[in-house]
Image (cartoon, grey):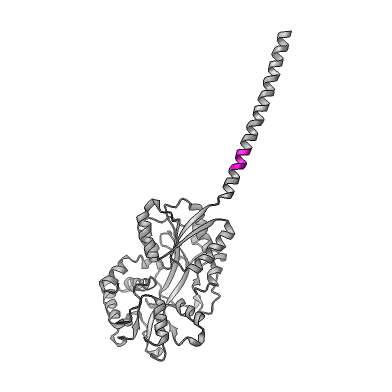
Amino acid sequence: MQRNQAQTGLTRFGARAFVICSLFTLISTATTAVGSSTAGASQPVTITLYNGQHVQTTEALVAGFTKQTGIKVAVRSGEENTFDDQIIAEGKRSPADILFTEDSPSLEYLQQKGLLAKVDASTLAKVPSRYNSLKHDWVGVSARVSVLVYNPSLMKRSQLPTSVLQLANPRYRGKLAIAPGEVDFQPLVGSVLESYGKAATLKWLEGIKANAGSHVYPNNETIDNEVNRGTVAFGVINQYYWYRMRAQIGAAKVHSLITYFAPRDPGYVVNVSGAGILKSSKHQAAAQKFLAYLVSKAGQEVIAHSISFEYPIASGVKTAQPETPFNDLKPNAISVGKIGSDTQVIALLREAQLL
Protein backbone atom coordinates (compact mmCIF):
# COMPACT_ATOMS: atom_id res chain seq x y z
CA MET A 1 0.00 0.00 0.00
CA GLN A 2 2.74 2.43 0.94
CA ARG A 3 4.63 1.32 -2.13
CA ASN A 4 1.62 2.11 -4.25
CA GLN A 5 1.26 5.54 -2.65
CA ALA A 6 4.94 6.27 -3.25
CA GLN A 7 4.60 5.24 -6.85
CA THR A 8 1.52 7.45 -7.18
CA GLY A 9 3.40 10.38 -5.66
CA LEU A 10 6.29 9.94 -8.04
CA THR A 11 3.87 9.71 -10.94
CA ARG A 12 2.17 12.98 -9.94
CA PHE A 13 5.53 14.70 -9.52
CA GLY A 14 6.61 13.49 -12.95
CA ALA A 15 3.39 14.74 -14.50
CA ARG A 16 3.77 18.14 -12.82
CA ALA A 17 7.36 18.39 -14.00
CA PHE A 18 6.33 17.47 -17.55
CA VAL A 19 3.67 20.20 -17.56
CA ILE A 20 6.12 22.83 -16.25
CA CYS A 21 8.74 21.86 -18.82
CA SER A 22 6.17 21.94 -21.60
CA LEU A 23 4.99 25.41 -20.59
CA PHE A 24 8.57 26.64 -20.48
CA THR A 25 9.18 25.25 -23.95
CA LEU A 26 6.05 26.93 -25.33
CA ILE A 27 6.97 30.29 -23.78
CA SER A 28 10.51 30.06 -25.14
CA THR A 29 9.24 29.17 -28.61
CA ALA A 30 6.75 32.04 -28.59
CA THR A 31 9.39 34.50 -27.43
CA THR A 32 11.77 33.38 -30.17
CA ALA A 33 9.04 33.70 -32.79
CA VAL A 34 8.14 37.23 -31.64
CA GLY A 35 11.81 38.18 -31.62
CA SER A 36 12.31 36.87 -35.14
CA SER A 37 9.22 38.70 -36.36
CA THR A 38 10.40 41.94 -34.79
CA ALA A 39 13.85 41.56 -36.31
CA GLY A 40 12.33 40.94 -39.74
CA ALA A 41 10.10 44.01 -39.41
CA SER A 42 13.03 46.23 -38.46
CA GLN A 43 15.05 45.08 -41.46
CA PRO A 44 12.90 45.46 -44.60
CA VAL A 45 14.15 44.28 -47.97
CA THR A 46 16.35 46.73 -49.87
CA ILE A 47 16.87 46.28 -53.60
CA THR A 48 19.67 47.89 -55.58
CA LEU A 49 18.83 49.77 -58.78
CA TYR A 50 21.44 50.62 -61.39
CA ASN A 51 19.86 53.72 -62.89
CA GLY A 52 20.60 55.09 -66.35
CA GLN A 53 17.33 57.03 -66.43
CA HIS A 54 16.85 60.70 -65.54
CA VAL A 55 17.54 61.05 -61.83
CA GLN A 56 14.49 63.17 -61.02
CA THR A 57 12.13 60.71 -62.69
CA THR A 58 13.69 57.73 -60.94
CA GLU A 59 13.61 59.43 -57.55
CA ALA A 60 9.89 60.10 -57.90
CA LEU A 61 9.20 56.51 -58.98
CA VAL A 62 11.27 55.05 -56.14
CA ALA A 63 9.51 57.24 -53.57
CA GLY A 64 6.10 56.09 -54.80
CA PHE A 65 7.14 52.44 -54.83
CA THR A 66 8.58 52.50 -51.31
CA LYS A 67 5.51 54.27 -49.98
CA GLN A 68 3.26 51.66 -51.56
CA THR A 69 5.24 48.52 -50.68
CA GLY A 70 7.65 49.37 -47.84
CA ILE A 71 10.51 48.00 -49.96
CA LYS A 72 13.52 50.29 -50.00
CA VAL A 73 15.54 50.98 -53.14
CA ALA A 74 19.24 51.87 -53.16
CA VAL A 75 19.81 53.88 -56.35
CA ARG A 76 23.14 54.10 -58.15
CA SER A 77 22.88 56.48 -61.11
CA GLY A 78 25.21 56.64 -64.09
CA GLU A 79 25.51 55.92 -67.81
CA GLU A 80 23.67 52.79 -68.90
CA ASN A 81 26.48 51.74 -71.26
CA THR A 82 28.89 51.85 -68.32
CA PHE A 83 26.48 49.79 -66.23
CA ASP A 84 26.42 47.11 -68.96
CA ASP A 85 30.17 46.64 -68.70
CA GLN A 86 30.06 46.82 -64.91
CA ILE A 87 27.35 44.16 -64.64
CA ILE A 88 29.29 41.82 -66.92
CA ALA A 89 32.50 42.39 -64.92
CA GLU A 90 30.71 41.81 -61.60
CA GLY A 91 29.04 38.62 -62.79
CA LYS A 92 27.09 36.71 -60.15
CA ARG A 93 28.60 38.95 -57.47
CA SER A 94 26.82 42.05 -58.80
CA PRO A 95 24.92 43.90 -56.06
CA ALA A 96 22.44 45.11 -58.68
CA ASP A 97 18.94 43.70 -58.75
CA ILE A 98 17.56 45.88 -61.57
CA LEU A 99 18.85 47.92 -64.49
CA PHE A 100 16.66 50.88 -65.49
CA THR A 101 17.68 52.51 -68.77
CA GLU A 102 16.84 55.45 -71.01
CA ASP A 103 16.91 53.27 -74.11
CA SER A 104 16.45 49.63 -75.03
CA PRO A 105 19.85 48.67 -76.59
CA SER A 106 21.57 48.30 -73.21
CA LEU A 107 18.89 45.89 -72.03
CA GLU A 108 19.05 44.00 -75.33
CA TYR A 109 22.80 43.67 -74.86
CA LEU A 110 22.44 42.10 -71.41
CA GLN A 111 19.64 39.91 -72.74
CA GLN A 112 21.96 38.56 -75.43
CA LYS A 113 24.48 37.76 -72.70
CA GLY A 114 21.82 35.72 -70.86
CA LEU A 115 22.01 37.94 -67.77
CA LEU A 116 18.35 38.96 -67.42
CA ALA A 117 15.51 37.11 -65.71
CA LYS A 118 12.04 36.70 -67.23
CA VAL A 119 9.57 39.43 -66.37
CA ASP A 120 6.21 38.41 -64.90
CA ALA A 121 3.59 38.00 -67.63
CA SER A 122 1.13 40.22 -65.73
CA THR A 123 3.67 43.06 -65.83
CA LEU A 124 4.41 42.66 -69.54
CA ALA A 125 0.68 42.66 -70.28
CA LYS A 126 0.39 46.27 -69.06
CA VAL A 127 2.53 47.48 -72.00
CA PRO A 128 1.90 47.15 -75.77
CA SER A 129 4.03 44.17 -76.84
CA ARG A 130 6.05 46.14 -79.43
CA TYR A 131 7.62 48.14 -76.58
CA ASN A 132 8.76 45.07 -74.61
CA SER A 133 11.55 42.57 -75.03
CA LEU A 134 10.71 39.98 -77.68
CA LYS A 135 12.05 37.35 -75.25
CA HIS A 136 10.18 38.79 -72.22
CA ASP A 137 13.43 39.66 -70.41
CA TRP A 138 12.69 43.36 -69.89
CA VAL A 139 9.66 45.64 -69.86
CA GLY A 140 9.10 49.02 -71.52
CA VAL A 141 8.32 51.84 -69.10
CA SER A 142 8.25 55.16 -70.99
CA ALA A 143 8.99 56.54 -74.44
CA ARG A 144 10.41 59.43 -76.42
CA VAL A 145 10.34 60.11 -80.14
CA SER A 146 12.98 61.36 -82.58
CA VAL A 147 12.33 64.78 -84.12
CA LEU A 148 14.06 67.47 -86.13
CA VAL A 149 14.68 70.68 -84.21
CA TYR A 150 15.21 73.67 -86.51
CA ASN A 151 15.66 77.42 -86.46
CA PRO A 152 13.09 78.93 -88.86
CA SER A 153 15.28 82.01 -89.37
CA LEU A 154 17.92 79.74 -90.94
CA MET A 155 15.80 77.09 -92.61
CA LYS A 156 12.14 76.82 -93.53
CA ARG A 157 10.22 73.73 -92.59
CA SER A 158 9.64 72.95 -96.26
CA GLN A 159 13.41 72.76 -96.78
CA LEU A 160 13.94 70.10 -94.09
CA PRO A 161 14.42 66.42 -94.92
CA THR A 162 11.33 64.26 -94.70
CA SER A 163 13.25 60.97 -94.63
CA VAL A 164 16.15 59.99 -92.39
CA LEU A 165 18.23 59.00 -95.44
CA GLN A 166 18.04 62.59 -96.70
CA LEU A 167 20.17 63.70 -93.76
CA ALA A 168 23.14 62.55 -95.86
CA ASN A 169 22.17 64.73 -98.84
CA PRO A 170 25.02 67.17 -99.63
CA ARG A 171 22.53 70.05 -99.73
CA TYR A 172 22.61 69.98 -95.90
CA ARG A 173 26.40 70.33 -95.60
CA GLY A 174 27.24 72.62 -92.69
CA LYS A 175 23.59 72.86 -91.64
CA LEU A 176 23.10 69.60 -89.71
CA ALA A 177 23.87 68.93 -86.03
CA ILE A 178 24.19 65.42 -84.56
CA ALA A 179 25.26 63.81 -81.27
CA PRO A 180 26.45 60.31 -82.25
CA GLY A 181 27.67 59.52 -78.75
CA GLU A 182 24.17 59.94 -77.29
CA VAL A 183 22.35 56.75 -76.34
CA ASP A 184 19.26 58.37 -77.90
CA PHE A 185 20.99 58.52 -81.30
CA GLN A 186 21.89 54.85 -81.39
CA PRO A 187 18.31 53.49 -81.79
CA LEU A 188 17.95 55.82 -84.79
CA VAL A 189 21.01 54.20 -86.36
CA GLY A 190 19.64 50.79 -85.38
CA SER A 191 16.41 51.58 -87.19
CA VAL A 192 18.28 52.56 -90.36
CA LEU A 193 20.36 49.38 -90.07
CA GLU A 194 17.25 47.20 -89.69
CA SER A 195 15.57 48.91 -92.65
CA TYR A 196 18.41 49.28 -95.17
CA GLY A 197 21.25 46.97 -94.14
CA LYS A 198 24.86 47.46 -93.09
CA ALA A 199 26.38 48.84 -96.31
CA ALA A 200 23.69 51.48 -96.80
CA THR A 201 23.84 52.47 -93.12
CA LEU A 202 27.61 52.96 -93.22
CA LYS A 203 27.35 55.08 -96.37
CA TRP A 204 24.60 57.11 -94.68
CA LEU A 205 26.72 57.67 -91.57
CA GLU A 206 29.62 58.88 -93.67
CA GLY A 207 27.26 61.31 -95.41
CA ILE A 208 25.84 62.79 -92.23
CA LYS A 209 29.33 63.11 -90.76
CA ALA A 210 30.35 65.19 -93.77
CA ASN A 211 27.20 67.31 -93.49
CA ALA A 212 27.60 67.91 -89.76
CA GLY A 213 31.24 68.98 -90.03
CA SER A 214 32.02 70.97 -86.88
CA HIS A 215 28.48 70.50 -85.55
CA VAL A 216 29.09 67.07 -84.03
CA TYR A 217 28.09 67.66 -80.42
CA PRO A 218 28.42 65.63 -77.21
CA ASN A 219 24.71 65.51 -76.39
CA ASN A 220 21.19 66.49 -77.41
CA GLU A 221 21.05 69.42 -75.00
CA THR A 222 23.89 71.06 -76.92
CA ILE A 223 22.11 70.52 -80.24
CA ASP A 224 18.96 72.04 -78.77
CA ASN A 225 20.82 75.09 -77.47
CA GLU A 226 22.92 75.67 -80.60
CA VAL A 227 19.91 75.46 -82.92
CA ASN A 228 17.98 77.79 -80.64
CA ARG A 229 20.87 80.29 -80.71
CA GLY A 230 21.09 80.11 -84.50
CA THR A 231 24.56 78.57 -84.57
CA VAL A 232 23.31 75.73 -86.78
CA ALA A 233 20.15 75.32 -88.85
CA PHE A 234 18.76 72.00 -87.60
CA GLY A 235 19.54 68.78 -85.78
CA VAL A 236 18.20 65.41 -84.72
CA ILE A 237 17.09 65.04 -81.10
CA ASN A 238 14.35 63.42 -79.05
CA GLN A 239 11.25 65.54 -78.55
CA TYR A 240 11.52 65.83 -74.78
CA TYR A 241 14.71 67.90 -74.94
CA TRP A 242 12.89 70.71 -76.76
CA TYR A 243 9.87 70.67 -74.48
CA ARG A 244 12.08 70.63 -71.41
CA MET A 245 14.17 73.55 -72.72
CA ARG A 246 10.99 75.53 -73.33
CA ALA A 247 9.79 74.83 -69.78
CA GLN A 248 13.15 75.89 -68.34
CA ILE A 249 13.84 79.12 -70.24
CA GLY A 250 10.30 80.19 -71.12
CA ALA A 251 8.50 80.18 -74.46
CA ALA A 252 9.55 83.78 -75.23
CA LYS A 253 13.21 82.72 -75.35
CA VAL A 254 12.64 79.76 -77.64
CA HIS A 255 13.52 80.57 -81.25
CA SER A 256 13.37 77.02 -82.60
CA LEU A 257 10.63 74.61 -83.58
CA ILE A 258 10.34 70.84 -83.92
CA THR A 259 8.88 68.66 -86.63
CA TYR A 260 8.77 64.98 -87.50
CA PHE A 261 10.01 62.82 -90.32
CA ALA A 262 7.36 61.51 -92.72
CA PRO A 263 4.93 59.04 -91.15
CA ARG A 264 6.42 55.52 -90.78
CA ASP A 265 9.85 56.66 -91.97
CA PRO A 266 12.70 54.67 -90.35
CA GLY A 267 13.87 57.95 -88.81
CA TYR A 268 10.55 58.39 -87.00
CA VAL A 269 11.73 56.31 -84.06
CA VAL A 270 10.12 55.67 -80.69
CA ASN A 271 12.89 55.22 -78.11
CA VAL A 272 11.83 53.11 -75.15
CA SER A 273 13.08 53.38 -71.60
CA GLY A 274 12.93 49.97 -69.94
CA ALA A 275 13.84 47.91 -66.92
CA GLY A 276 15.12 44.38 -66.43
CA ILE A 277 15.98 42.13 -63.50
CA LEU A 278 19.37 40.47 -63.25
CA LYS A 279 19.37 36.69 -62.95
CA SER A 280 21.94 37.08 -60.18
CA SER A 281 19.54 39.16 -58.05
CA LYS A 282 18.94 37.75 -54.58
CA HIS A 283 15.66 39.65 -54.29
CA GLN A 284 13.73 38.39 -57.29
CA ALA A 285 10.26 38.80 -55.77
CA ALA A 286 10.89 42.38 -54.63
CA ALA A 287 12.48 43.24 -58.00
CA GLN A 288 9.42 41.89 -59.83
CA LYS A 289 7.25 44.12 -57.64
CA PHE A 290 9.32 47.14 -58.65
CA LEU A 291 8.88 46.42 -62.35
CA ALA A 292 5.16 45.89 -61.79
CA TYR A 293 4.97 49.30 -60.09
CA LEU A 294 6.78 51.04 -62.95
CA VAL A 295 4.05 50.03 -65.42
CA SER A 296 1.13 50.31 -62.99
CA LYS A 297 -1.27 53.24 -63.13
CA ALA A 298 0.45 54.81 -60.11
CA GLY A 299 3.92 54.53 -61.64
CA GLN A 300 2.80 55.73 -65.05
CA GLU A 301 1.08 58.76 -63.51
CA VAL A 302 4.46 59.76 -62.07
CA ILE A 303 5.89 59.71 -65.60
CA ALA A 304 2.85 61.49 -67.03
CA HIS A 305 3.47 64.49 -64.76
CA SER A 306 7.27 64.38 -64.80
CA ILE A 307 9.27 67.37 -66.04
CA SER A 308 11.29 64.92 -68.13
CA PHE A 309 8.46 65.11 -70.74
CA GLU A 310 8.65 61.39 -71.46
CA TYR A 311 5.53 59.54 -72.57
CA PRO A 312 3.88 56.97 -70.28
CA ILE A 313 3.20 53.86 -72.38
CA ALA A 314 1.49 51.46 -69.96
CA SER A 315 -1.80 50.97 -68.09
CA GLY A 316 -3.65 53.36 -70.42
CA VAL A 317 -2.10 56.48 -68.83
CA LYS A 318 -1.61 59.56 -71.04
CA THR A 319 0.86 62.40 -70.64
CA ALA A 320 -0.29 65.45 -68.70
CA GLN A 321 2.32 67.64 -70.42
CA PRO A 322 1.53 70.06 -73.30
CA GLU A 323 3.10 68.02 -76.10
CA THR A 324 1.85 66.03 -79.06
CA PRO A 325 -0.24 63.15 -77.65
CA PHE A 326 1.51 59.80 -77.97
CA ASN A 327 -1.42 58.26 -79.84
CA ASP A 328 -1.16 60.99 -82.50
CA LEU A 329 2.42 60.04 -83.40
CA LYS A 330 3.11 58.04 -86.57
CA PRO A 331 6.42 56.27 -85.97
CA ASN A 332 7.95 53.48 -88.01
CA ALA A 333 6.56 50.00 -87.53
CA ILE A 334 9.80 48.43 -86.33
CA SER A 335 9.48 46.65 -83.00
CA VAL A 336 11.83 48.00 -80.33
CA GLY A 337 13.19 44.50 -79.82
CA LYS A 338 14.17 44.27 -83.50
CA ILE A 339 16.41 47.33 -83.21
CA GLY A 340 18.48 45.06 -80.98
CA SER A 341 21.56 45.86 -78.92
CA ASP A 342 23.99 48.68 -79.64
CA THR A 343 26.93 46.38 -80.44
CA GLN A 344 26.71 46.56 -84.23
CA VAL A 345 25.57 50.19 -84.15
CA ILE A 346 28.60 51.25 -82.13
CA ALA A 347 30.86 49.29 -84.47
CA LEU A 348 29.39 51.16 -87.45
CA LEU A 349 29.70 54.53 -85.71
CA ARG A 350 33.37 53.78 -85.03
CA GLU A 351 33.94 52.66 -88.61
CA ALA A 352 32.44 55.96 -89.78
CA GLN A 353 34.72 57.72 -87.26
CA LEU A 354 31.80 59.24 -85.42
CA LEU A 355 32.92 57.75 -82.10
* Residue 122 appears in the figure: no
Principal SS element in the magenta part? helix
Whether residue 216 is situated above or below residue 151 in the rendered picture: above
Q: Residue at x 69, y 13 (%)?
A: 7
Residue 129 coordinates in the image, percent (x, y):
46, 65
Looking at the image, residue 166 sits to the left or right of residue 97; the answer is left
Looking at the image, residue 63 sits to the left or right of residue 54; the answer is right
The residue nearer to you, when weighing 116 against 213, is 213
Q: Residue at x 30, y 88 (%)?
A: 171
Whether residue 279 is situated above or below residue 24 in the rendered picture: below
Residue 213 picture quarter: bottom left
Residue 61 coordinates in the image, percent (x, y):
53, 64
Whether residue 56 is situated above or below residue 37 in the rendered picture: below
How many marks do you count on the picture? 0
Residue 40 coordinates in the image, percent (x, y):
57, 47
The residue nearer to you, when weighing 212 against 221, is 221
Q: Quadrant of the C terminus?
A: bottom left
Residue 203 picture quarter: bottom left
Residue 33 drawn in magenta: yes
Looking at the image, residue 149 sits to the left or right of residue 208; the answer is right
Residue 95 picture quarter: bottom left
* Residues drawn in magenta: 31-35
Residue 295 coordinates in the image, percent (x, y):
52, 64
Q: Residue at x 37, y 86 (%)?
A: 231
Q: Quadrant of the N terminus?
A: top right
Whether residue 321 is situated above or below residue 1 in the rendered picture: below
